[in-house]
């Protein structure tokens, strides 16, 4: 019992640490790396930008050729050197939102230093329904996770991967996921236009099918460890290298690693079909087809080998018992053929429901980040602040008498920025540590209002505690949150499966020990190896990370004890399907819709994020509420778990769901990670 418990928790801890390392290292330093960029002619501006960014310059004969390349999605932008000081900067927001930010910022600064001016031409602009280009990455979640989930749950239920009809089940499931994802993102939520619905649904089907078939093939070869291998290669490693924010912004090694797995090619396929007229999809389709064909070959081979072995065993058994071949054949069951046998119906339905929640919840919460009543401090006149508002930028203007008072509000994480407008040139102070998106959004809207009023606006950054050396966009905290949540609920799920019961007088102690140990390792790796957290915050970040893991683990353990194996699935829905989308993440809660903003304060993820962020970057200010919520979850969870374990009533069961099913669901229902 002791050995099994240790092995299960160590396994989960290793996965959680690997998940954190992969996600953080992939997104913490988004910057152009060998980014394809077109040029026409020569310019000192381009040469200056090359000194700052890693660009893969591609020369075009004229402006028309460069713009055509941008419309096909061949390049992330371009610069056209004209005559008489009339250069043109071409940006391609749909290729990468953050890539476009780098292009605009880098060339604007270089042009000012060189005394050069240019006009900007936008190719493939992002629509309001996909303001930051996040929809492509969000669409990857249901199609990627759905494929893994159906394969893993089918295997855990039937205890075999290669079986007659398995390919048909996976393909049917992929078709259902594709239609649901398309309807959710299209007509229901409005994240994708109707005219792109059919081709994207076909893409969703292809990706889900390829992922599901690949998982089945790996399971048929590896056996019981197949689901773990699939989660490691496709979700943790492949997901980190997917490049939802732009492949060229990933570190070079993640660009290379990602190209080996389906997620990156799925992202490129979705993006090019949605925004670039289906250009440059030959490579993604070829890679996905190769995975699919190879997987089908392996599945068919393993199915025939398994069937042949079973037939031989039956024949030998029949011979030994005196049965002839006719009686053996007569003993075979007959009846109407089903696409999904009755004994596999439950895992298929569970997979479909959970995958549908990924499609609805994550797309609805993240596809259109619009500032809603974002608190902004104002010292002096509020006229400029009022004029900066529009349909996509709503702020809550909070007046302060002095700049010191406004600064204190920023130190307390109470506002997203400050406008100082006391009669002279107005100054705008933005806070990168509050949000990765807000500084850009606030500056753009206030600058537009200032220009309309004929004023020159000065914009400066302010961070109460400087961001970590390798976290310039404040993405690491939100990224780590996913790994901490996953580690929490997986520890409770796999521990119950390993020991065969959800009961145990020392269950809470085991989970607490796991939380402390895993929190320590994640903190060490993130702080001293990845440099994603300030070193001064190491000792205070460790107990907070441990508390987050423990809260989720206790929550999962209580539901597992009270509801049986179905409790893990309920935990996954509450924590991952509703809690994580309502956390606000790196964008900030001000960008959530009313529904997601309202439920966030009652669930662990939002409070976990605020506690960790405010402690590290705001000197522990404004943490009383999130700390109180998490402690309440921990204390109540521990008390309820102790009570349930003391009274050893039979564990509830749900027909069609066992411990293996719930553990497999927990192990594969992992989002690819937050997108910048």
Image: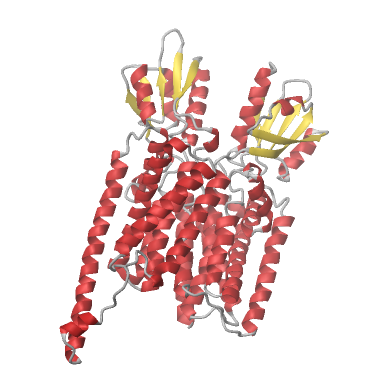
- Residue 104, image x, y percentages: 50, 27
* Residue in the picture at 70% in, 18% down: 453
Q: How is the image coloured?
A: secondary structure
Instruction: State how many labels appear.
Output: 0
- Tell me which corner region of the image, top left, top right, bottom left or bottom right, holds residue 268: top left
- Residue 238, image x, y percentages: 39, 52
Residue extending farthest to the right is 401
- Tell me which corner region of the image, top left, top right, bottom left or bottom right, holds residue 587: top right
* Residue in the picture at 52% in, 61% down: 486
Q: Is residue 224 left or right of residue 3?
A: left
Q: Is residue 350 visible?
A: yes
Q: Which residue is nearer to you in this view: 495 or 464?
A: 495
Q: Which residue is nearer to you in this view: 143 or 642?
A: 143
- Tell me which corner region of the image, top left, top right, bottom left or bottom right, holds residue 95: top left
Q: Is residue 228 visible?
A: no
- Residue 83, image x, y percentages: 41, 9
Instruction: Say above or below: 44 vs 6.
Output: above
Residue extending farthest to the top is 84
- Residue 256, image x, y percentages: 34, 46
Q: Is residue 80 left or right of residue 371?
A: left
């Amino acid at each position: 019992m002791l050995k099994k418990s240790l092995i299960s928790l160590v396994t989960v801890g290793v996965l959680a640490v690997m998940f954190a390392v992969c996600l953080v290292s992939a997104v913490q330093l988004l910057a152009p790396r060998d980014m394809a960029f077109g040029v026409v002619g020569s310019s000192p501006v381009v040469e200056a930008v090359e000194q700052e960014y890693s660009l893969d310059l591609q020369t075009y004969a004229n402006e028309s050729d460069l713009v055509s390349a941008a419309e096909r999605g061949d390049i992330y932008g371009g610069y056209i050197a004209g005559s008489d000081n009339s250069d043109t900067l071409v940006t391609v927001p749909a290729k990468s939102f953050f890539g476009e930010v780098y292009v605009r910022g880098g060339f604007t600064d270089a042009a000012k230093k060189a005394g050069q001016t240019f006009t900007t031409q936008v190719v493939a602009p992002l629509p309001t329904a996909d303001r930051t280009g996040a929809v492509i990455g969000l669409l990857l979640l249901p199609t990627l996770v759905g494929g893994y989930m159906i394969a893993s749950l089918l295997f855990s239920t039937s205890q075999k991967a290669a079986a007659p009809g398995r390919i048909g089940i996976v393909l049917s499931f992929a078709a259902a996921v594709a239609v649901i994802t398309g309807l959710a993102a299209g007509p229901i939520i409005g994240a994708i236009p109707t005219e792109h619905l059919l081709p994207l649904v076909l893409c969703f089907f292809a990706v889900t099918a390829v992922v599901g078939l690949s998982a089945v093939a790996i399971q048929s070869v590896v056996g019981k460890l197949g689901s773990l291998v699939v989660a490691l290669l496709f979700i943790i490693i492949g997901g980190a290298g997917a490049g939802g924010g732009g492949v060229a912004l990933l570190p070079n090694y993640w660009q290379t690693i990602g190209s080996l797995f389906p997620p990156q090619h799925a992202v490129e396929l979705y993006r090019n079909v949605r925004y670039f007229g289906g250009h440059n999809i030959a490579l993604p389709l070829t890679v996905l087809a190769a995975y699919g064909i190879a997987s089908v070959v392996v599945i068919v081979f393993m199915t025939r080998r398994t069937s042949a072995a079973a037939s031989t065993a039956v024949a030998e058994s029949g011979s030994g018992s005196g049965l002839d071949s006719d009686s053996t054949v007569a003993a075979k069951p007959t009846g109407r053929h089903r696409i999904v046998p009755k004994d596999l119906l439950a895992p298929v339905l569970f997979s479909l429901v959970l995958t549908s929640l990924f499609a609805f919840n994550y797309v609805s919460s993240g596809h259109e980040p619009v500032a809603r009543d974002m608190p902004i401090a104002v010292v002096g006149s509020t006229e400029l602040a009022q004029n900066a508002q529009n349909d996509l930028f709503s702020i809550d203007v909070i007046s302060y008498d002095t700049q010191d008072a406004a600064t204190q509000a920023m130190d307390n994480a109470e506002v997203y920025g400050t406008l100082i407008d006391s009669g002279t040139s107005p100054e705008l102070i933005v806070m990168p540590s509050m949000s990765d998106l807000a500084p850009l959004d606030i500056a753009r809207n206030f600058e537009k209002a200032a220009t309309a009023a004929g004023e020159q606006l000065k914009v400066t950054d302010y961070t109460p505690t400087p961001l970590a050396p390798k976290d310039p966009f404040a993405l690491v905290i939100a990224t780590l949150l996913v790994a901490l949540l996953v580690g929490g609920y997986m520890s409770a799920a796999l521990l119950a499966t390993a020991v065969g019961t959800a009961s145990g007088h020392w269950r809470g102690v085991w989970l607490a020990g796991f939380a402390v140990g895993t929190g320590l390792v994640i903190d060490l790796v993130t702080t001293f190896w990845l440099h994603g957290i300030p070193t001064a915050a190491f000792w205070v970040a460790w107990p907070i990370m441990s508390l987050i893991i423990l809260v989720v683990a206790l929550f999962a353990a209580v539901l597992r004890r009270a509801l049986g194996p179905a409790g893990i699935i309920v935990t996954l829905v509450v924590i991952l399907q509703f809690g994580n989308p309502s956390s606000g993440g790196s964008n900030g809660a001000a960008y959530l819709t009313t529904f997601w903003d309202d439920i966030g304060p009652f669930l662990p993820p939002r409070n976990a994020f605020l506690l960790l962020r405010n402690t590290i970057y705001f000197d522990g200010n404004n943490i009383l509420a999130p700390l109180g919520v998490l402690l309440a979850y921990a204390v109540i969870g521990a008390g309820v778990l102790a009570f349930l374990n003391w009274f050893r009533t039979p564990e509830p069961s749900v027909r069609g769901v066992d411990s293996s099913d719930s553990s497999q669901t927990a192990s594969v229902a992992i989002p690819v990670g937050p997108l910048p």
